[in-house]
Image (tube, rainbow, N blue to C red):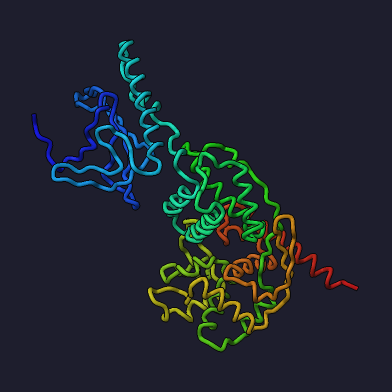
Amino acid sequence: MKEIAPHIAPQYMGIKRKYGRFYLDSKPDKQSNLPLMFEYTNRGFNDDEGVYKRNRIRHYTGFRIPGKQITTKKVISYACWDVNQQMARGFRGADDVNTYITTITDKVSKYLRGKKETFQPVDMSELKRLITVNHSVSHESIVSFCENYLKRYNKPGQESTKRNISTMVSSLKDHVGTRPPLLVNVNKEFVEGFITYLTNDKKNNNTTVEKKISMLQQILREAHKQGLLGSSSALEEIKVQRSSTEIIFLKQKEIKTLEKHLPESDRLEKLKDVFLFGCYTGLRYSDLQQIHQAHYLKKSDKGQQYHVLKFVIKKTRKFHEIALPPKAVIIIEKYWDQQKFKKLLPVPSNQKANDYLKELCEDAKIDTEIELTAQYGSEVKTEIKKKYEILSCHSARHTYAILSLENGMRPEVLQRNLGHSKLSQTMDYVKILDSVRHFETLKTFAI
């Protein structure tokens, strides 16, 4: 009998080979766990070209076994996997794995015996459907699934979305503590409990709660597609009553005030130019940060020359082209030879930009008092803040949209300039503009 070489992994041997075998894959994950695989090989066949092909199923069971090795001179074995018995041992969850192995072995053996007794060929696709069961719900927790989803989330231009999902997952971990529920037990009541926690314990306003629940249900939909969710009730729409979001922007008078303001430091001077450029073009912060000289082009139409920016929007990955007003061109020319990597603007980090902006606008006396309304559960709270306290880089985009409409730009043109995929997104600014006009009208003719 031929001696087995020491380097051959012993998991390829086992007493259940007649009805398929279970073995550990050789590629561990980051936690050094090895995927548990099932394999069944039926009699091979020759295809239409006469080439012999194996008729084999290799199926990932969804279970992972701790990969701690026990090495001897002759063989390599694993502390948590009995090669001969093809059973898990010595770790939490081993009983679930063994129950699954027994179930699959019984199903496969019953199916194969039935085919043999009736002299029918084995249908490999039918056999694969037979062994594909919702086993992972027995050990996958809601937290671990969310964390794995976050690791896989790698959409270009969606870094801020990934940070928001990470914040939601942190809140979820705080909510469930050290014993998170399994996916099979996650239902509508669990989601409602998370809402209560976010509202009462985390003191999140309803807008924030709604966004976090939307992110959670996005992840749960992925689990549902994989057959890992025990109940679809967790995906049902849950309405979170919310107040309308306040859109902060600068009025035309405030833009002129900021244009005339002379900052005392170089960093605030640069930030002023970056923010005003956003007010003139409506670009997002992520696009202000990425645009460089290759995006800056000169065009001519009917004898008139003008400049445009042509680039791929970082958030949507779509091509975008927008004409630049003279004031924006002046800012570009000011920093043309001053930036590294031929960037057009001296854009700091998002956090620094928001901090500098508040400082800049406070110095420029942009301090109109604004009443902010936020809803926490059924309670509505209001507070008064000065405008410079709540301005952010994104306020430049809002300013561009509102002032463009005030100056007569058609909504469908503004939609293209902002890069909105739907006109309904742009129409939100039209509603705001109407309310501003009504307020100013009543204020002007107040007796």
User: In the image, is 23 to the left or to the right of 164?
Assistant: left
User: In the image, is 109 to the left or to the right of 186?
Assistant: left
Q: Residue at x 50, y 56 (%)?
A: 316
Specify the quadrant that holds the N terminus: top left
Residue 72 position in % (x across, y down): 17, 45
Residue 421 visible within the image:
yes
Q: Residue furthest front?
A: 90
Q: Residue at x 46, y 47 (%)?
A: 145
User: In the image, is 358 to the left or to the right of 4?
Assistant: right
Specify the quadrant that holds the C terminus: bottom right
> Is 313 drawn above or below residue 215 in the view shown?
below
Residue 121 position in % (x across, y down): 30, 16
Q: Nearer the viewer, residue 275 or 248?
A: 248
> Which quadrant holds residue 155?
bottom left
Residue 326 visible within the image:
no
Residue 237 position in % (x across, y down): 63, 43
Q: Nearer the viewer, residue 361 or 230?
A: 230
Residue 141 position in % (x across, y down): 48, 45
Q: Residue furthest top?
A: 118
Q: Residue at x 54, y 53 (%)?
A: 172
Q: Nearer the viewer, residue 48 or 39?
A: 39
> Is 379 drawn above or below residue 112 in the view shown?
below
Q: How many marks?
A: 0
Q: Residue at x 51, y 71 (%)?
A: 350
User: In the image, is 368 to the left or to the right of 309?
Assistant: right
Q: Residue furthest right?
A: 447
